[in-house]
Image (cartoon, helix red, strand yellow):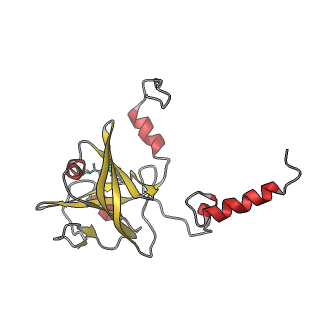
Amino acid sequence: MNMPDGGVRTAPRPIDPRALRSCMGQFATGVTVITCRRGDIVHGTTVNAFTSVSLDPPLALVALDRRSRAGALLLEDGGYVVNILDETQRDLAMHFARPMPGPVPWVDESGPHPRLAGTVAHLVCRPWQVHDAGDHTLHIGGVEEFESRPGRPLLFHRGAFPELAPDDSAGAWSLCLDGMDPVEHFHARDETDETDETRD
Ligand SMILES: Cc1cc2nc3c(=O)[nH]c(=O)nc-3n(C[C@H](O)[C@H](O)[C@H](O)COP(=O)(O)O)c2cc1C
């Protein structure tokens, strides 16, 4: 592994890929379907390796298997849509995870950015950067449009789709750099520190 200090560290080997996948499965995610149009082709694929990357500029990332059709299509010119599935859309998640026929609630199917109806949110992205990452490729997209709708997301954990627990409290972002009013928050904490005479 190449380290930032220029050194190289070797990971202990061998790592069992199935055990690693099982370990990674402890990380609960939502489920997206990445949709795109390339010429006459309208394509979708189910992806849970999706994350927000940056707010300024607005960037989001998806990791796609090199062997996937979606991975090849996203390397071609054109944008794509990240559809964040609703908790009622398990069948749609499975539909786009393996080739099978079935009704798909397309929106703008004949347009440049076909997407899915009934999702909790969608983001229209344009390719920004692509990085090689082993058997996957990381596609970082610039977010051009987005819309969030009321609803609860479909979850994915340890290979299953568990139900989201009822809402309890919000506010986990309040202490974070990109939370609401983070500057005010950190200033408030600095002022307290300055008047704290018990501090070493
Ligand atoms: C819940 C779930 C999450 C998945 N996440 C990913 C993912 O993050 N990246 C990926 O490349 N494939 C992922 N897959 C597998 C693809 O959906 C699957 O390989 C699909 O057949 C690829 O289609 P394509 O080759 O037509 O693009 C996931 C499948 C499921 C069921």
Q: Is residue 150 above or below residue 42?
A: below
Q: Nearer the viewer, residue 96 or 57?
A: 57
Which residue does the image show at 36% across and 70% down from the upper left?
A: 119
Q: Position of residue 133 (x, y in %)?
A: 34, 38
Toward which corner of the image does residue 127 lie, by quadrant?
bottom left
In x, y percent, where is residue 196?
85, 55
Residue 35 appears at what percent x and percent y?
26, 61
Please state the horizontal and vertical placement of residue 21, each as a whole percent of the image. Answer: 42, 40
Residue drawn at x 37%, y 65% as measured from the top left: 85
Is 94 positioned to the left or the right of 198 in the image? left
Q: Residue at x 84, y 57 (%)?
A: 195
The residue closer to the viewer here, 2 or 45, is: 2
> In which quadrant will I find the C terminus?
top right
> Which residue is most to the bottom?
150
Q: Is residue 52 above or below residue 26?
A: below
Q: Is residue 14 left or right of residue 45?
A: right
Residue at the extreme right: 198
**Quadrant of the frame with the N terminus:** top left
Residue located farthest toward the left when viewing the structure as drawn: 40
Count of numbered circles on the image? 0
